[in-house]
Amino acid sequence: MPWASRRAGTAVCVLEFPRSRNVNADDHDISARVFMSVMTAVRESLQGKTSLSRVFWAYGVLGSLVYSALGLLINPENALLIRVYGIFGFLFDLFVTVATYQCAANCQSKSLARFVRISAVLSLVVLLPVCAYLEFTGTLGFGLPE
């Protein structure tokens, strides 16, 4: 009780401090919730339950911009980090392309859905493998130093 009485008619404020809480347990709960919400978003996107506009704008455009900005923080002389960055970039592109294909069914326009699916298939079959090959072999001069 925050107020206690010493004498009749006089109130004294009694400070009650919250009990010591385990910060690590709360941090773990928060990180677990964030991880689960991210995994739910990924799963729903891959199952085609997300709107096509969300996949395109949030994952395709905004996600690519954030990922590219993270690439600016990598030291270009660190071959291992560049390789890991490239692998995660390839996996991210693969996720966005598959999610775009799956979520095309949510589009109201059948012709747009067909166009998106054809583009996703072409990207999976032609563009992603060619870009991965060119990146990891250094054919374009952007490859890893020997």
Image (spheres, rainbow, N blue to C red):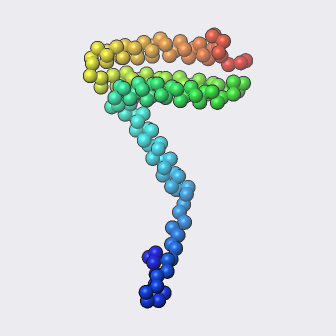
Asked if residue 88 can be seen in this view, the reply is no
x%, y% of residue 48?
34, 28
Residue at image position (53%, 63%) is: 21
Q: Residue placed farthest to the bottom in the image?
A: 8
Q: Can you say whether 28 is above or below 20 in the image? A: above
x%, y% of residue 130?
53, 12
x%, y% of residue 29?
48, 52
61 left or right, relative to 140: left
Residue at image position (61%, 27%) is: 71
Residue at image position (73%, 18%) is: 146
* Residue toward you, 137 or 30: 30
Asked if residue 124 can be seen in this view, the reply is yes
Q: Can you say whether 69 is above or below 139 in the image? A: below
Residue at image position (47%, 89%) is: 7
- Quadrant containing the N terminus is bottom left
x%, y% of residue 60?
45, 25
Q: Can you say whether 120 is above or below 91 in the image? A: above
Q: Can you say whether 68 is above or below 5 in the image? A: above
* Residue toward you, 1 or 93: 1
